[in-house]
Amino acid sequence: MVRRRTRRGLVLGVSLLALVGFGCTRETTPPPPPVSTSATPTESAQEREERLAYEAAEKSYRDFRAEYRRALNAGGASSATSPMKAVAGGSYLQEATEVLQAYKGLQQHSSGAGKIVYVQRQGYSATSLVLMTCEDTRSVKIFDKAGKMIGRGEQRQAELEVRLEDGSWKVWSGRGRKVTSCDA
C-alpha cells in the first residue's frame, strides 16, 4: 500500500511538474507587426524628385533675392555677385545686373529688406519648373546720392522659370507685375 501511494504521488508529482512547465513555456509564434499610424502615404520616387526640385528652386530664389537686396542696399554693383551667379542665370540675372549697375551709376542705395509673401509651385518637368511668387517691399526706401529719399518699394507678383543647369536649379527668366495685394 505504501508502494501504491508512493507510485501515485510520483505520477501526480510528474504530472504537476509537466503542467507547470508547460504553462511557463514561451509562445513560439511571433507577435503581429505593429500597425502603421501614419496618415500620409509613402511618396513615390517621382513625387520625391519633384518635391526636392521645388525645394531647391525655392531656395535658389530666396538666396538670390536676399543677395540682390543686400547689393541694392550697398549701392549697387558693376556686375552680379558670385552668390547671385550661383543661383540665377539667363535674362533674370541679366536684368537684375542692369538694375545693380544703374544704382551704382546713379549712386543710389536703398534700405530695408521687404519680405517674400509666398512662393507657389506651378509647373514641373525634370529640367524646368515654374514658381509663382509675390514680394512686399513697401518698407524699402530708395535714396539718391545726397541721401534724399526718392522712392519706396512695392508689391510685385512674378511667374518665374527655374532651370536645372549644371546640376543646380537656377532662376532663369520671368515676368512680373505690380499688384495691390499679395493675397494668394
Image (cartoon, grey):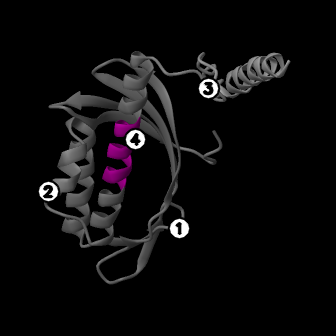
Question: What's the amino acid at mark 3?
Answer: Thr
> Disc 3 or disc 2, which is closer to the eye?
3
Q: Tell me the residue that label 3 is attached to.
A: 40
Does residue 160 appear in the picture of this structure? Answer: no
Q: Residue at x 58, y 19 (%)?
A: 30
Q: Give the image quarter of residue 165.
A: top left
Q: What crowding class fits label 1: few (fewer than 14 Cα within 10 Å), some (14-19), or many (20 or more)?
A: some
Instruction: Give the mark, 3 or 1, whose residue is nearer the N terminus.
Output: 3
Q: Residue at x 52, y 22 (%)?
A: 42
Is 122 contained in the magenta span? no
Q: For residue 139, which numbered disc appears in the image?
A: 1
Q: What crowding class fits label 4: few (fewer than 14 Cα within 10 Å), some (14-19), or many (20 or more)?
A: many
Task: State how far apart marks 3 and 2 are (Cα).
Answer: 47 Å
Is 168 placed above or below 1 here? below
Question: What's the amino acid at mark 4?
Answer: Glu
Instruction: Give the mark, 3 or 2, whose residue is nearer the N terminus.
Output: 3
Task: State how far apart marks 3 and 1 are (Cα).
Answer: 40 Å
Residue numbers of the magenta segment: 55-65
Q: For residue 79, which numbered disc appears in the image?
A: 2
Left/right of residue 76 with respect to residue 133 in the rendered view: left
Element marked by disc 4: helix
Contact between labelled residues 1 and 4, with CB atoms less than 8 Å apart: no
Task: State how far apart marks 4 and 1 are (Cα).
Answer: 23 Å
Q: Main secondary structure of the magenta part?
A: helix
